[in-house]
Amino acid sequence: MSTTTSHALPSGARPAPRSSILVATSAVAAAGTMLMFGMLAMWLKFRDGSPLRAAARGKMIHDWLPADIKIPEVATNTMAITMVIACVMAQWAVYSTRRNDSSHATLALAITSVIGIAAINAQVAVYLQMEMGLADGAYQTMFYAITGTMLALLVTGVAFSIITMFRAVAGRLGDSSVMSAHALYWYFLTAVFVALWFVVYVQK
Amino acid sequence: MSTVNSTATAGHASTSSALGTVANWITTTDHKKIGRLFVGAGVLWMLVIVGVGVALGIERIASDSAIFNSNSVTQLFEMLRTGATFGVLLPLALGFGIAVVPTQVGSKSLSFARLAMFGFYAWLIASGLVIGSILANGGPGGGDPQMVDLYLLGVGVGLVGVIAASVSLVTTVLTSRRTGLSMLEIPMFSWSVFVAATSLVLTLPVLLGSLIYVAVDHHYARLVFGGNEGINTWLGWGFSQPQTFLYVIPAIGLLAELAPIAARIRQPLRGAMLIGVGIVSTAMFGTVTQTSHVFVWGGTLSDKLKSAIPYAWFNLLPVLGVIIVILLSLLAIQKGKTRLIAPLVPTFLGVGMIITGMVGNAVQRIDAAGLAGRVFEEAVVTYIAYGAMLCAWGAIAYFGPALWGRKIADSVVIIIGLAGFFATILAALPYYFAEDQPAGVVGNFQYAGPQTAFNVVVSGGHILMGVCLLSAIAVSIKSLRSGEAASATIWSDQ
């Protein structure tokens, strides 16, 4: 018996973790990035195609943003910072899950959800403060289309956070790839929002 | 009385069984069933497309008389264009992929099967919306604004569905392969489906983004994107070349899969074959520019290069990929102890038709050829769409035994394949020579060539394709119900 044991082959390596949810989320993030960057590209195309007009100090600028529209910069800048914080919270959830710390993971996910809702609230506040009609002009139509799409992606991010939080509350922390996928989705949301923020709200 | 009761009970049981079967199909997460639902619905779309092709062909025979009014003609052309890509090519590519890929990579199931099923339902509902809206004077150029909105909604929902199903396929190939099976070792068909699905995940969201802009503008303002007339300007690239090349990549992969099986050898230069299939996906870069790249030979050397490089990149490089696949398939057939397997016939002929369309597209994009706005472009689409249908017939004959356990007779597969090949030639080739006939119209044109003969032959081709399609459906149903049972090792005896 002992001879048999000594000649037995070692057991094979454990199969690689599948991480289906992480891979699928990566694919969705890639698709979402193409969606938003495609929309930003069209935004830039139309902005560059708008006629030139003289601005302050004689500088010639594209007549894209109507002169009577003011972008609430405090709200939009706060949104950008808030999104970055959401990434930190989502990564905290991953860290806590790997340490099997259910309470911290739940807290991190709850904060991520609240931050996401705050970002949605800020976007609605931006709409209200800008007081422009969707059919008032080319800028207005495209502004609502691109920020509305971003808003829809944010809603899915909040839903993802809430579902993941319920999993954490239920103690389902064994598969950390769900948390990693959740964090990846928020990284994606933040990346595309920062791009949108720079093009639409900063460069105008 | 007891007889009546027992009959009633039997009837009730039968009804319950039928309802159970229906419920099982509409809520299934079995990848074979989801794939077959996609393929079945795609085949129904094929019937619509062939019917529209016949109607337009007949309308064109006498250019000075009209059956349809001019608005209806525009709608029919849109139905043909949208249907050939969105209704036929995409569901066929996804359907065969979903049905077959998990089995080929050694997975028991599809990753996120419910996501794929959601994709099917989204696409199916979208199909209904698109057909309904076009029939009700919607679609690009449509006269009813609400129906145009409905068309845009339908295309948007369908795109979401296709992207969802593609994500499921990509995830399956990347994460659900059996242990030890590397990406370079997966069957060529699965590789081609993976390449196609990845390309769709990366390109269709861009189309969706454009569609969101166009839909919002059309519904609320009609200030920016040209209203109903501007739809094709902004979204047309998603339904034309080179984007359509992405939709037929699995057809090319099927040839790469079947050739070494027929030759009974391992594919020579398999790595090059993988690259060949991958090169076709360079067509996805057409998404970046969303325009046709025409080759203009004029100006300075710099001007010529500026024209030639994007032209070659978008129009010639995908053709190179298909040529590599065809040459390597022929190499396998030449080197091995080849025997004829029935599914290879329609597949080989289908890929031949596809590359004829791709080469035609490259010729059409040469400015000096003067083919812009001519029926030549319709012939290109016909070659690609009908070529893909021939490959789909090859796929049904080859994969069918694995999906429903029964074979289709070899002679029938070959006869329908050959008839479909001739139908494609008849429906497309005349328009390669009728270069003076304008595209998108059915009357008030006159040119030096035998225009009536050309249009009669094209109509005959569409009718023959319709007959082939109905025959293929009938044969498939017969195989399902009473075909010869397939052996346990289904693919080993082919």
Image (cartoon, coloured by chain):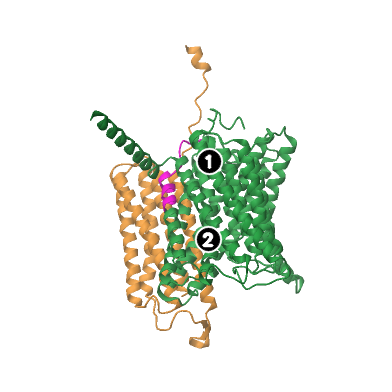
Q: Position of residue B399 (x, y in %)?
A: 55, 38
How many numbered circles are shown? 2
Q: Chain of mark 2?
A: B
Q: What chain does badge 1 belong to? A: B
Q: Residue at 41% of width from left, 50% of height from top?
A: B118
Specify whether residue B354 is in view. Answer: no
Question: CA gap, disc 2 to disc 1?
Answer: 26 Å
Which mark is drawn over residue B82?
2
In depth, the one of B408 and A114 nearer the eye is: B408
Quadrant in which residue B187 is drawn: top right
The range drawn in magenta is B105-121
Tell which of B231 and A109 is nearer to you.
Answer: B231
Residue drawn at point x = 54 percent, y = 40 percent:
B475
Look at the numbered disc 1 and give the secondary structure of its residue.
helix
> Where residue B16 appears, x then y in whole percent?
32, 38
Note whether B411 is above or below B84 in the view shown.
above
Q: Between B363 and B171, which is closer to the camera in this rendering?
A: B363
Q: In the displayed image of the protein, which residue is found farthest to the right? A: B301
Residue appearing at x 32%, y 44% in the figure: A101
- The tag on residue B476 is 1
Q: Colour of chain A?
A: orange
Residue B160 location (% of width, % of height): 45, 56
Question: Is B389 included in the stretch rendered in magenta?
Answer: no
Foreground disc of the pair 2, 1 = 1
Image quadrant of residue A140?
A: bottom left
Instruction: Give coordinates of residue B106: x percent, y percent.
Output: 51, 35
Crowd rating for badge 2 (residues with CA inside 10 Å; few <14, some 14–19, many 20+) = many
Q: Report which quarter residue A113 is drawn in.
A: bottom left
